[in-house]
């Protein structure tokens, strides 16, 4: 696990402090100088809230942000997984504060209240990542009304609930960064995953509208479009093109956050595919999707 620049600096400050605390520099100006550096750095630690932090990309984002000295608010439904991950990160990164909040994004009002409450407890909320999501192979009933509703509730309405609650808090504090994890499937309708595809298209359009609304504020909006990432969501997919590890995905997402990018597509091959999908006329697109549909149908048959 890599150590972030700020974490590294803080460790140096801690180290100097412990040297200074020993006999040689006791009561010296040097001691108070080092102490003030350390205090200043603690004050500057930012706070990030991540939904879906109990698994996959969310877990990796938590590790990446911890290494960058962010205080963390980790949200998901599975308390034990969240608590274990938080404990592991806390022992690796002793200078940050990590809080676990068990929250179901589909309990919209309750979830929004939790976001606001925990952000208030930290005083500031610099970054929110609406990452919680379900795919056709992580829910029980796909291609049914219940499955469709669950996908929209989590991927679209749940993400919007997180973002809206965080936005209110950020507007009040005067700054912040909102990130939504969409998907390459949002670009055009993909066969067999209509609900997933449409939920992500909805999220992308929502984020774009919000970005234009907030253009004159100090709140940045970033829409992330991952290709295939190796996580529990995709573990039964079989062979996937240009598969990226969750750690690499988290690094790329953090880089886009640092650069305040409006959109991120990764890996780069997906950017090319995205461009191609946009310009393909319907007859050619339909032909390509016919092949894809057969592949997905075969995968589902094998799975059941
Ligand atoms: N993996 C990929 O190839 C890929 C590609 C494009 C986009 N994405 C998107 O990236 C995001 C993360 O996916 P992943 O691959 O990391 O999937 P994952 O490993 O299955 O993790 C999904 C996370 O969402 C949380 N979640 C699901 N339903 C929830 C609910 N009702 N309330 C709160 N949290 C909920 C889960 O936590 P609990 O079950 O503990 O609540 C889990 O932490 C998703 O939005 C996904 O659509 C993934």
Image: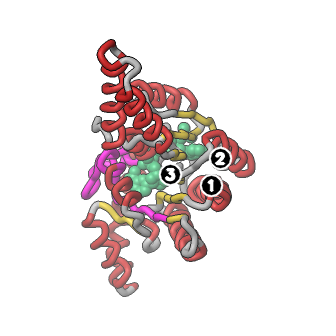
* Residue contact at pointers 3 and 1, CB within 8 angstroms: no
Mark 1 or 2, nearer chain start: 2
The label shown at residue 152 is: none
Q: Residue at x 59, y 56 (%)?
A: 159
Query: Does dot 2 land on a helix, a strand or a loop?
Result: helix
* Residue contact at pointers 1 and 2, CB within 8 angstroms: yes
**Residue 113, position as x, y percentages in the image:** 72, 47
Residue marked by disc 2? 115
Residue 205 visible in the picture: no
Q: Is residue 258 left or right of residue 119?
A: left
Relative vertical location of residue 121 with respect to residue 167 in this rendering, above or below: above
Q: Residue at x 53, y 73 (%)?
A: 208
Mark 3 or 2, nearer chain start: 2
Determine the CA span between mark 1 and mark 2. 7 Å
Q: Which portion, as a residue range, is magenta?
A: 221-250
Residue 146 among magenta residues:
no
Determine the CA span between mark 3 and mark 2. 14 Å
Residue marked by disc 3? 131
Relative vertical location of residue 144 with respect to residue 272 in this rendering, above or below: above
Quarter assignment of residue 304? top left
Residue marked by disc 1? 166
Determine crowd level at label 2: few under 14, some 14-19, many 20+ residues with C-alpha closer than 10 A: many
In this view, the residue farthest toward the right is 109
Q: Residue at x 55, y 40 (%)?
A: 73
Mark 2 near ligand 1 (CB under 8 Å)? no
Mark 3 near ligand 1 (CB under 8 Å)? yes
Relative vertical location of residue 118 with respect to residue 292 in this rendering, above or below: above
Q: Nearer the viewer, residue 136 or 303?
A: 136
Q: Residue at x 34, y 73 (%)?
A: 274
């Amino acid at each position: 696990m890599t150590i972030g620049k700020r974490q590294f600096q803080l460790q140096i400050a801690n180290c100097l402090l412990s040297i200074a605390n020993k006999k040689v520099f006791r009561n010296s100006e040097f001691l108070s100088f080092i102490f003030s550096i350390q205090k200043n750095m603690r004050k500057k630690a930012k706070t990030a809230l991540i939904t879906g932090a109990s698994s996959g990309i969310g877990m990796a984002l938590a590790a990446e942000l911890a290494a960058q000295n962010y205080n963390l608010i980790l949200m998901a439904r599975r308390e034990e997984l969240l608590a274990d991950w938080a404990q592991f990160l806390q022992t690796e990164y002793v200078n940050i504060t990590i809080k676990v909040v068990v929250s179901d994004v589909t309990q919209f009002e309750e979830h929004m209240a939790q976001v606001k409450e925990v952000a208030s407890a930290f005083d500031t909320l610099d970054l929110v990542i609406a990452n919680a999501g379900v795919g056709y192979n992580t829910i029980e009933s796909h291609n049914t009304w219940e499955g469709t509703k669950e996908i929209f509730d989590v991927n679209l309405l749940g993400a919007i609930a997180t973002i809206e609650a965080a936005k209110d808090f950020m507007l009040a504090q005067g700054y912040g960064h909102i990130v939504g994890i969409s998907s390459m499937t949002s670009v055009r309708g993909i066969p067999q995953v209509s609900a997933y595809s449409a939920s992500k298209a909805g999220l992308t359009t929502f984020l774009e509208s919000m970005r234009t609304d907030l253009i004159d504020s100090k709140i940045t909006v970033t829409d992330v479009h991952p290709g295939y990432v190796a996580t529990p969501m995709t573990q039964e997919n079989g062979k996937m093109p240009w598969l990226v590890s969750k750690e690499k995905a988290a690094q790329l997402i953090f880089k886009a956050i640092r650069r305040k990018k409006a959109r991120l597509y990764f890996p780069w091959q997906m950017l090319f595919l995205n461009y191609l999908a946009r310009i393909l006329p319907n007859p050619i697109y339909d032909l390509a999707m016919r092949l894809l549909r057969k592949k997905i149908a075969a995968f589902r048959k094998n799975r059941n």
